[in-house]
Image: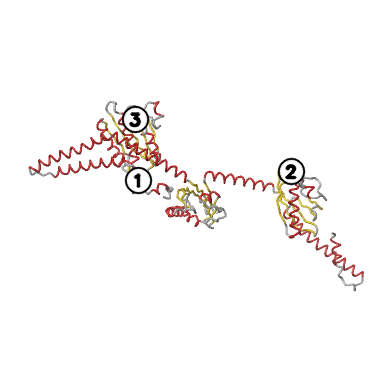
Amino acid sequence: MDVATTTIQGLNFLPELLPPSTRVQINEKLRQEMLEQRETERSAQLQMILDVNPDLYFHLNLRGVITRFVNEKNQHHFLPVETVHQRHLHEIFPSSVASQFETALQELIQSQVPVTFEYALEITQAMRWFQARLLPYQPEETLVIIQDITQRKTAEIKLQHVHARLSEAQRQAHIGSWEWDTRENTLWWSEEIYRILGLGDLDFHPTTQTFMEMVHAEDRKLVTRVITNTLDNRLPFSFEHRIVRPQGEIRYVHLQAGFKPDATGESQLMYGTIQDITEKVEASRIAQEYRDELAHVSRLVVKGELIAGLSHELNQPLTAIANYCGAMKTLMEQGEDVSQLRDKIERQALRSGEIIHRLKAFTQKQPQQKFLFNIHDSIRSALQIINYQIRLKQIEVKTCFKHKFTTVYADRVQIEQVLVNLFKNAVEAMEHSPAPRTLTISTASTPDRMIQISVSDTGCGVPESFRSKLFTPFATSKQSGLGIGLSLSRSLIQAAEGKMWFLPNPRKGATFCIQLPACQKPLERPRTELNRHFRADAAHD
Ligand code: ADP
């Protein structure tokens, strides 16, 4: 419909009283004014469109035919056909896209509100994405603005792929990521965190409070302490704790965090990961149980081997006590002072008790229990257990302890078992060696805060062909040997986060070295089971 005709028809209500020439004049004036107003509106609309800087726009009539086509930027690749003027949408676009246009057109006709949609077209064998915006324009015409959004869409798709891959990687590794804006107190979790925490509802809005409620009650203090410390000092953290899922299931998680500095250099954004390590903790618990069991069996074997020596070891103080008692009786009959003899009897009795106590502690079966102790005390204890063999074979023991206190955090019984194994092997290796037979035990601290214990002998040494098998279970060169001593020892040392290795001596004999993490803290009581699993970084613990 023509604009001018519409306007003149609109003036037909004018009173008939006016002379026809005047009526024509007024009509003409009004028509001009309306045309001008329409033109102003249209240019404003066009200006608005041009402000958006469309790549292309066209007019579409209500039947879906293109009535005017403006392609100022000469973007021919926008349409799959060359000539579009007076052609129907279905002649230009593939039917799926044409239908999208038709649906949008209907929506616009009904609501008179702009409608936007996106579509994809394969043009010259490449997929391109466009955004179409339909605006009300003329009573019977719609303005369609097309924008090429291929770049944005490609980036979006790439991002979606990256997100999907990251999500899958997180799912497989049971690692979720999180971000916490400490200023706004807003928390974001990746999907995997919802899975780890057993929350089915991905729309659940996380808060620090809800997270703390899910932390195991016994670990809440520790988590609060570590996070507070981190906030105060802007330091990264890494530690393990437990969470309780809504259904009551307990899971072990490894929580890590760092700070992202913002433009001002202030770091308000804390970010990090949560990894579900329940299976790992469970597997290491089972492995530890097996190790404890094996260690116990091995100690019983050692006990069997040492029992003859130990009974001799016990015999000595008991014989001494019997002798002292005899002497005491005689002296008492003569009315002499027996206090010195009484003291000697007491010392021997205490020594017997100590030997029994050591052997009992050594062979008792108990789960791994780590606590702080002085490694030198353990070396002395282990030497006491093997003392009889040492004396029998006339072996000289040399100790070289660099520091007075050398504290380690481990299972003391297991470490002593390793030492007894090493001393026993050294003694056996020197069995047929000519004198002097020397067992040298030295300790020193390393720059990486480890305590190194070296056990060296002047025995037969390890043949080169056997060295690679030394730590292999059941590899033995002895007729009555089991071959589990060294492999078990290495496994116990590794469980204490240490390492163990062999060194051939330059002249004769062998040296076995152990490294255990050194502890700077004062000695304390045994730690609880919980502490074993919660190794907060030294900076925070
Ligand atoms: P076992 O003592 O029952 O054989 P081990 O695992 O303790 O089991 O030792 C394995 C083997 O390693 C021994 O049989 C021996 O051949 C060798 N070995 C261990 N310690 C020494 C040592 N100090 N000197 C020479 N050989 C050693």
Q: Which mark is residue 123?
A: 2
Closer to the chain start, of discs 1 and 2, is 2
Instruction: State the mark number for residue 481.
Output: 3
Residue 522, x across and y down, in percent: 34, 48
How far apart in space, not on screen, are marks 1 and 2 (Cα)? 73 Å
Q: Nearer the viewer, residue 217 or 31?
A: 217
Q: Residue furthest bottom?
A: 17
The answer to which image quadrant residue 453 occupies is top left
- Residue extending furthest front? 247
Mark 3 sits near ligand 1, with its Cβ under 8 Å away: yes
Q: CA distance from mark 2 to mark 3?
A: 79 Å
Amino acid type, label 3: Gly
Residue farthest to the left, as pictured: 334
Between 141 and 180, the residue placed more toward the observer is 141
Q: Position of residue 489 (x, y in %)?
A: 37, 36
Residue 120 falls left or right of residue 530: right
Which residue is disc 1 drawn over?
A: 372
Mark 3 or mark 1, earlier in chain: 1
Q: Indicate the secondary structure of the residue bearing disc 3.
A: loop
User: How far apart are the two marked residues, 3 and 1, measured between alpha carbons?
Assistant: 33 Å
Q: Which residue is at the front of the view, 482 or 226?
A: 482
Which element carries disc 2, helix, strand or loop? strand
Q: Amino acid at mark 1?
A: Leu
Is 447 on the left-hand or right-hand side of 37?
A: left
Q: Earlier in the sequence, mark 2 or mark 3?
A: 2
Amino acid under disc 2: Ile
Rendered position, 234 above or below 169 = below
Quadrant of ligand 1 in image: top left
Secondary structure at numbered mark 1 = strand
Graded by Cα atoms within 10 Å as few (under 14), some (14 to 19) or many (20 or more), the crowding at tag 2 reads few
Residue 541, which numbered label?
none
